[in-house]
Amino acid sequence: MRCQKVRSFLSAYCKGELAEKRTGAIAAHLEGCIRCRYEETAYRELNKSVGELSGYTVSDDFNSLLLKRVADERFKETRSKAYLPKKIPVVTFNRLAPIFATACFVFAFIFSGGMDLFIDTQEVSTYVSTELDDSYLTVQPEWEFNKEVARATRINGLVNQLSNQSSFGTLASSSQRNSFRSPFNRQYPPMIRTYRYLQSNSYKGVNSSR
Amino acid sequence: MEKETEKQRDYNLIKRVQNGDMVAFSEIVDKYKNRLMNTIVRMISSQQEAEDVVQETFLRVYQHRDSFDFRHCFSTWLYTIALNLARNELRKRKRFKFYDITDMQGHESEISVEMKLPSNISKVLENAIDSLPEKYKTAFILRDIQEQSYEEVAKVMNIPLGTVKSRVNRARALLRDKLKPRMEESNALSKGTLLPVSLL
């Protein structure tokens, strides 16, 4: 072995950290190399000095100070356990994802008109999609006009009666209540409401029942 | 074998601490306080601050006792906490420079003379260790002063095993170079006794 290589292993050699084979090779080199032996002596002196280094110790009140701090810590833990829930619930993606997906689906369903499946669309379309019939505004014979006025007066009376009642309590029979699907609950101006009521089957039904 | 029983004893102690046994915690403190003190004092070169760091280390151990991983060695965990706190302290010191009030009272010359001409070789060695770069110093202290295995040092410092070996080797070489003149002075390495006349 060359001196340079031997010197790179010398510190580990002096500590006995090398493998047996390498230790033998270095020992053989040291026997014949006085300069490397000089280096080896320096390392051995260093190891000896390190071994003789005085140890540091903690102060006498170290334990009491530490235990006081630990006692404070224990008190804090106990207090937090007493007043706070044991574990703060962790909101993870796995928990949130299905909720979020369901919410998205519901919103998409509502806004895409899926709710029409559950609403009586036929009734709605009767009142909404038909065009306004303005034939009653045209000039008509007087007797017909008076007849219409009388009819409208009667209807208005009925409208007032209905609008004064929050429910259909006065319509006694359940068959009448079912057949009477009033458009007055809908958001129309009073005149149109009256007109639509005249047009509707419900009115006819009520009228015929009278 | 002895290390294994030591490890097992530490595991038992930390398990007892996890169950709220303060006697076990005191045993851990008594077992490791001086070892940690020896390491930390040499790292940050101030006994008072080192004591604070050691105290903080044990407090952290208590606070995080439930998060101890039983796959690892307890002493490794403890030294890792202590070294991290010591590094934080050194970083803080770099940010804020503190001056001792005694320095302003005319003791500068006394201190500097002591640093230049220490009374014995141990003092020279302490100063030499103190002057090492931090990475070499830590590796040297853990390996040669605390006598931990290379593997443990690698785990504590979180660096590869080969790096630990090279750092320790480098630290020893630097210390040897720094101590050489002093050794020659104290006649431990007298050239006349070792080298033949032809080489002088």
Image: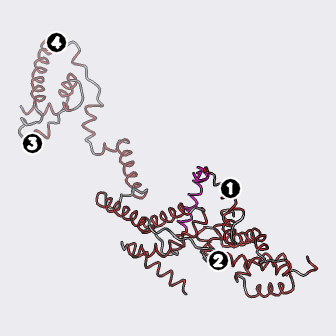
| Amino acid type of the residue tagged 3 in the rendering | Ser
Q: Residues within 10 Å of mark 1 (few under 14, many from 20)?
A: few
| Amino acid type of the residue tagged 1 in the rendering | Ser
Magenta span: B80-103
State whether discs 2 and 4 lie on one chain.
yes
Q: CA distance from mark 1 to mark 3?
A: 112 Å
- Chain to which the residue tagged by mark 2 belongs: A
Q: Which callout, 4 or 3, points at the residue further toward the start of the chain?
A: 4
Disc number for residue B171: none
| Disc 1 secondary structure class | helix
Q: Nearer the viewer, residue A118 or A125?
A: A118
- Chain to which the residue tagged by mark 4 belongs: A
Image quarter of the N terminus of chain B: bottom right
| Disc 2 secondary structure class | loop
Question: Where does label 3 land, which residue?
Answer: A174
Residue B156: give x, y in percent of width and height: 58, 69
Q: Which callout, 2 or 3, points at the residue further toward the start of the chain?
A: 2
Question: Where does label 1 land, which residue?
Answer: B109
